[in-house]
Image (cartoon, rainbow, N blue to C red):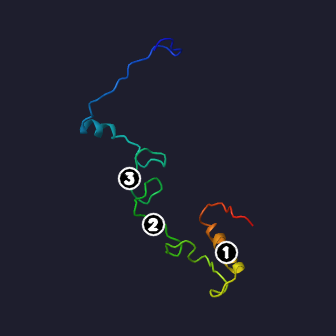
Amino acid sequence: MKNNPFGQDKPEVRNTVAPTANDTLKAHTHADTDKTWKAAHHTLGHLRDQASPGSHQHKNDDGSLRLGEGDGYSLTGDKTNASLAEVDNTINQILLMLDNYIAFTDNRTA
């Protein structure tokens, strides 16, 4: 490139030959596997610096998988012939419960 203020362009150099299995094994002999959470390599497991398998579950203290299980949440009101105010009140109760577990912004207008 003519008049390049950063100097002359250098040709791109690429190694088109894949490393052998033995070379890859040698390169990973001193890998950082599970050394810290920032490590480039992780095994699957339950320890602090391991990666979680895709089948893992987040259980509550009581062993349940449901959000809010055992937290004592309850809805009040009449299920039949509910007024608009009662429906709105129920929605507000649900949103207050969800706010403990899900970050969201309530952009409803008054």
At horizontal 70% and vertical 82% (from top left) the residue drawn is 83
Q: CA distance from mark 1 to mark 3?
A: 42 Å
- The quarter of the picture where residue 12 lies is top left
Determine the secondary structure under disc 2.
loop
According to the picture, the residue beneath numbered tag 3 turns out to be 43
- The quarter of the picture where residue 102 lies is bottom right
At horizontal 47% and vertical 12% (from top left) the residue drawn is 2
Q: Nearer the viewer, mark 1 or mark 3?
A: 1
x, y percent for residue 38: 48, 46
Residue type indicated by callout 1: Gln
According to the picture, the residue beneath numbered tag 1 turns out to be 93
According to the picture, the residue beneath numbered tag 2 turns out to be 57
Say few, some or many: other residues with alpha carbon within 10 Å of mark 1 (under 14 / 14 to 19 / 20 or more): some
Residue type indicated by callout 3: Thr
Q: Are marks 1 and 2 in contact (CB under 8 Å)?
A: no
Q: Nearer the viewer, residue 73 or 26?
A: 73
- The quarter of the picture where residue 97 lies is bottom right
Q: CA distance from mark 1 to mark 2?
A: 27 Å
Q: Which image quadrant: the C terminus? A: bottom right
x, y percent for residue 76: 66, 83
